Amino acid sequence: MKQAGRAPNQEPPQTPQARLWTHDFIIITAGSLISMVGNTMAGFAISLVVLDYTGSTFLYLLFNAAAQLPMLVCPVFAGPYLDRMSRKKAIYTLDFSCSGLYLLIFVLLCRGWFSYPLLLFFSLLAGAVNSVYAVAYDSFYPNLIPPGNQGRAYAVSSMLWPVAAMSAPAAALLYEALGSAAPIFALNAALFFTAACFERRIRYRETHMADAPPAGALESFRRDFAEGLGYIKSEKGLLIITAYFTVTNFSYATDQLALPFFRANAGQFAAWPVAAATLYAILSNFNTAGRFAGGFIQYKLRFSKEKKFAVALTVYTVLCFLDAFVLFLPVPLMAVCYFCIGILGVTSYTIRAAATQSYVPDAKRARFNGVFLMSTSLGGVCGSLFAGALAEVFGERPVVFGVQISMLAVIYLFMYRGRRHVAAIYNQDV
């Protein structure tokens, strides 16, 4: 029988407040942070390598899009199987795989190798691993949260990336000083290996496999995928949220134009005592600091459930204006703007993630997350190619401005007009 989320007028069950920082929650938090630090440094360094080697904004965004392409396919294939197998084992096995992949890149770079087509292949391979990992992690993580702590747990989760992102300036300085990204990939391999060792020590015993039908061949997969899509379609609030964030990811692809903008307009920032790319990395850390501050606020502050949707709608609107104008501002105001974007971005993530992951039944969570990730990744890939092509003709700033202002109409069409259905999911006491 098909399971459904809670009815809009049904009160969530009252659960006692438990201690958040349990053994398993500490391990999943530490493991995530360790791997994020390495990924951030390697991702920023390889972006500089590609941008310097090609000298093309479009090829740079094509490289970024290549990492997202597997997310159009892998999550929907992975979801049904991750509802039947150990998500914990999938998580640490994929982290071990990433460690080996980055070690291989380190060896090749040390030997003076560079090839844009082969680097695209590595980007596709890493994207495939990361997309499956994302479904497994998003589906496993809620089970490690003690009852009544969903909001605080996702606030903690939202603070991990900001902490990890503070390593981006270090990556930029190392790259400029050494002239090579190879040592950064060696560090990344070591950090992924360490994270996997941590994740193996999680004690939680998974039970979701007992609620899933036996695994089968292609016909079984097609049935499961159709059931996942049918579940989202039957839940109008989830359908609206998925559609909105798909379009949002299309617009957020313009964020990738910031680094090419700084690199191409270095003369505008000549008064600052660092290279333009390093200056951008420092400014992006104001966004990071804002995300950390936003996560801390969410950890300490609980919005009343009646106000969560109204807060989210306000955040979506303000973010459009801040993202549209940030590249037109002088550097000090850019820093302030990035800080505010960070705070608001975490607020948006925490409300959406805690609400949807609590609303979807555990036995269907991986399938939902697979479809959601596939759809939002499609928006990101299309947005990257669209933004890169337009930026080659019109420049980075006009493209960012036009796309972000257009998002105001999307907010109205999806979130405001569908507010009754979305509020039924967002306005939960979690």
Image: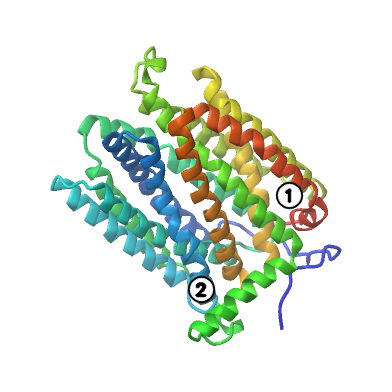
Q: Residue at x 69, y 71 (%)?
A: 231
Q: Which mark is residue 414?
A: 1
Q: Earlier in the sequence, mark 2 or mark 1?
A: 2
Q: Is residue 408 visible?
A: yes
Q: Position of residue 123 (x, y in %)?
A: 35, 53
Q: Nearer the viewer, mark 2 or mark 1?
A: 1
> Do the numbered discs 2 and 1 sit on residues whose CB atoms are within 8 Å?
no
Kindly state the secondary structure of the residue where label 1 is placed: helix
Disc 2 packing (10 Å; few <14; some 14–19; many ≥20): many
Q: Which mark is residue 334?
A: none
Q: Position of residue 257 (x, y in %)?
A: 46, 34
Q: Position of residue 100 (x, y in %)?
A: 27, 60
Q: Residue at x 37, y 14 (%)?
A: 270
Query: Which residue appears farthest toward the front when viewing the image?
Result: 393
Residue that mark 2 sits on: 82
Q: Position of residue 202 (x, y in %)?
A: 46, 67
The amino acid pointed to by label 1 is Phe
Q: Residue at x 40, y 31 (%)?
A: 260
Q: Is residue 363 visible?
A: no
Question: In the image, is residue 101 above or below residue 255?
Answer: below
Query: Which residue appears farthest toward the top when viewing the image?
Result: 271
Which picture quadrant has residue 60? Answer: top left
Disc 1 packing (10 Å; few <14; some 14–19; many ≥20): some
Q: Nearer the viewer, residue 393 or 77?
A: 393
Question: In the image, is residue 359 above or below residue 352?
Answer: below
